[in-house]
Amino acid sequence: MNSFALLGLCAVVVMAFCAFAAAPSASAVEWVTFECAEVAHGTGLWADSKCHEKTIGGNFERLKEKGLETEVASTSTFTLALEDMGTGVKIECSGIDEGVLGPHTKGKFTGMTFTLATCKVLAGSGTCKKILAVNAVDLPWGTNLFGSPVRNEITAGGAGAPGWLIECESLLGIKVDDTCIAALSSTAMSEGGSGVTATYDSASGEANCSVGGEKQGLTIGTDSIVGQF
């Protein structure tokens, strides 16, 4: 079974970060596929059987590593805190999203399911006493790996800019819908024993919210790619 990761290509510096390898003649990052095989004790570059955690004197090695030249289906699990600073409402939800990796630096989010049973109100319970629904808007979204350290840009995929719709019931029993749209967004990318993780952080950008106002929306959390192909 093949797995996937990020391959960093750099003509000047060999990256010490475990998500990236070096190559002599390019300056980009891309999704790669490979087979992880057990080798003679202490002769490999990877500590785990999925070849995601780099080490010295490991027992595993990546074989047949190559950049993705076509789209390949992937699945990931996420836990995200969504906040509208303008209203003071902050919620947290977990769920599953679907998409594709490749070709090369590209990718797509094609589906995102928030598990309502996991959602909880962290702040602003006056405006959002009860979470009725949480949904991604304007899917599909495009993605593109870039930079060093590597980030994954999230862009409009044709229907509109990436964003979220949070439906709440207020303390007064009024239904409140808040849509937050981010024209520019990106996630920090890392790789370890559990695979590839995308992290929404302070550099991920602010969203414009229909209730709270311009640049009031924040997303913080992780999205871990769990699929193999």
Image: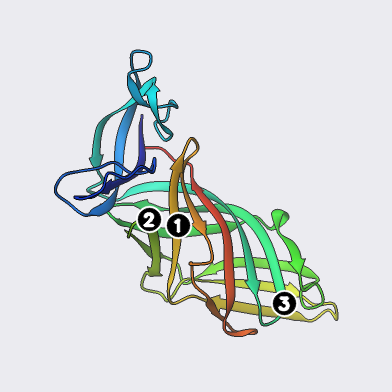
Give the CA distance from mark 2 to mark 1: 8 Å
Please, what secondary structure does the residue beneath circle 3 have?
loop
Tell me the CA gap for discs 2 and 3.
Answer: 32 Å
Q: Residue at 72% of width from left, 54% of height from top? A: 117
Look at 48% across and 67% down and name the residue there. Answer: 203
Dot 3 or dot 1: first in sequence order is 3
Q: Is residue 173 left or right of residue 210?
A: right
Which mark, residue 167? Answer: none
* Residue 88, label in figure: 3
Q: Earlier in the sequence, mark 2 or mark 1?
A: 2
Q: Residue at x 48, y 75 (%)?
A: 182
Q: Residue furthest left?
A: 25
Query: Do the numbered discs 2 and 1 sit on residues whose CB atoms are within 8 Å?
Result: yes
- Residue linked to disc 2: 149
Query: Is residue 5 placed above or below 132 in the rendered structure?
Result: above
Residue 118 appears left or right of 181: right
Q: Report crowding for label 1: few under 14, some 14 to 19, many 20 or more residues within 10 A (C-alpha).
A: many
Residue type beneath disc 1? Ala
Q: Earlier in the sequence, mark 2 or mark 3?
A: 3
- Helix, strand or loop status at disc 1: strand
Q: Quadrant of the N terminus?
A: top left
Where does residue 120 sit, x and y in percent of width and height?
Answer: 74, 60
Under mark 3, the amino acid is Gly
Residue mark closest to the camera, 2 vs 3: 2
Residue 165 shows in this picture: yes
Return the mark for residue 188: 1
Q: Nearer the viewer, residue 58 or 4?
A: 58
- Mark 2 or 1, closer to the camera: 2
Q: Secondary structure at mark 2?
A: loop
Residue 75 point in image, percent of width and height: 46, 47
Under mark 2, the amino acid is: Pro
